[in-house]
Image (tube, rainbow, N blue to C red):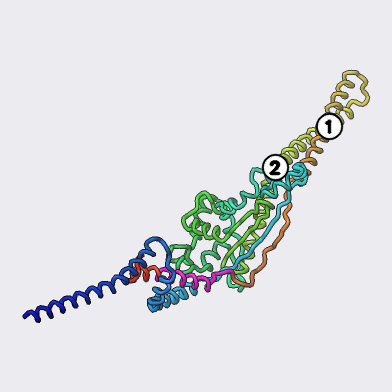
Amino acid sequence: MEQNEIKTDQQNSSVQDVEAGKEQMSKPTENATGKEKKSVLTGKINLGLIFSTIWRNRYKYIIPFVVVGVLSCLLVVTMPKVYKVTVMLAPEYNSSESSSLGGLGSLASMAGINLSSLNSQDAITPSFYPDLMNSMEFVSGLFDVKVTTQDGSFTGALSKYFTTKQKASWIDQQLGKLKRDDNISDVRNKVRTSNGSDKINPFALSKKEYELAQAIMGSITCTVDKKTDVITITTQTQDPLVTALLADTIKERLQVFITQYRTSKARNDLKNAQNLCERAHQDYIKKQKEYATFVDANQDLVLESFKAKEENLENEMQIAYTTYSGLKQQVQLHKAKVEARTPAFTTLQNASVPTKSAGPKRSIIIVVAELITFLITTIFVLIFDKNVKL
């Protein structure tokens, strides 16, 4: 009996030793796991752990990559090609204004400030030209611009081109952008009937006219270099010839607007001087006729009263002539002022029909989509992997 008890005690002690050994063997693994989790929880990025997790779950990336690749390919196929044309203009400033600044001009240019534009008496400086391009009055004036597609399949107004020839991508159609079925002719007829004119009323645009104006506005970009005041106009449509025609038209419209604005006061002064000069000329002709009639009728009379009246008529005629001569000189001065205020533009880059499309960048879109898919899939893999704790 005693021997059996001794054997039983030995067996129990051996079992306890084995269990103790297992516990000791499991402790390093738990410590390692605790260290691994600790390294992530303390904010340290364990690249080795991330790469090993990605490699272990690499098969989970196949389906997302294939699905996103197919969808992105289908998406870029539905995107129509667009063409861009850039026009650059350099406005000319009065040299007397710039020379009066002395050596401050060079210092200001180093700081990115154009003192010549600040010294200008104009309320609308070149920095306001982008806002002008985005105004409804300017954009609605482009509705009737005549354009022609490169293949010759369309010739007509720009508004009709945008509503019948501009293709919308699948995303734009889903977002409710301007579609090919849109037609604004009925709305424009109502505006013409009520106003009695052939121009769109920018003050009372309909919904479709507003959408059309927004579409045209989105195809026009205007930037101004603060140092040099160089104006850059960029247009973008789905036809190369239409894009070039639109850029050239906008350049001309901008030049006309700037010319009319800068010379508006001088032209008003010229008009007033011309009116005064015309009235002074008529008054001089009238006084001249009165004097000639009186002299012809009283050639043989020697009375002092008649001589005094003759002198008065002659003096009035001379005063009228002096006034007329002075106003005529004023007219010439105002004409010279109009010429001086008329701006000159140097075209640095003319509009030309592009031969290659500017977008969409299909390969870049697909690559970006796949990269985003990789990042999102990696996040889900790290979240749901049992061996990783974020």
Evaluate if marks 1 and 2 touch, with contact meaning CB atoms under 8 Å apart: no
| In this rendering, position of residue 237 left or right of residue 40 | right
Magenta-colored stretch includes residue 4: no
**Between discs 1 and 2, the one toward the N terminus:** 2
Q: The residue tagged with tag 2: helix, strand or loop? A: loop
Rate crowding at label 1 as few (under 14), some (14 to 19) or many (20 or more) other CA atoms within 10 Å: some
Mark 1 residue type: Thr
Q: Quadrant of residue 247?
A: bottom right
Given residues 373 and 296, the one toward you in this image is 373
Magenta-colored stretch includes residue 368: yes
The quarter of the picture where the N terminus appears is bottom left
Q: Quadrant of residue 317?
A: top right
The residue drawn where x is 19% and y is 74% is 16
Q: Quadrant of residue 160?
A: bottom right
Please name the residue that numbered disc 2 is placed on: 119
Given residues 219 and 25, the one toward you in this image is 25
Q: Magenta part of the protein: which range? A: 358-377
Rate crowding at label 2 as few (under 14), some (14 to 19) or many (20 or more) other CA atoms within 10 Å: few
- For marks 1 and 2, give the CA distance: 38 Å
Residue 217 in the image: above or below residue 124: below
The residue drawn where x is 89% and y is 28% is 295
**Residue 53 percent coordinates (x, y):** 39, 73
Please tell me whether the stretch drawn in magenta is mainly helix, strand or loop.
helix
**Residue 241 percent coordinates (x, y):** 63, 68
Residue 370 in view in this figure: yes
Please name the residue that numbered disc 1 is placed on: 322
| In this rendering, position of residue 268 left or right of residue 39 | right
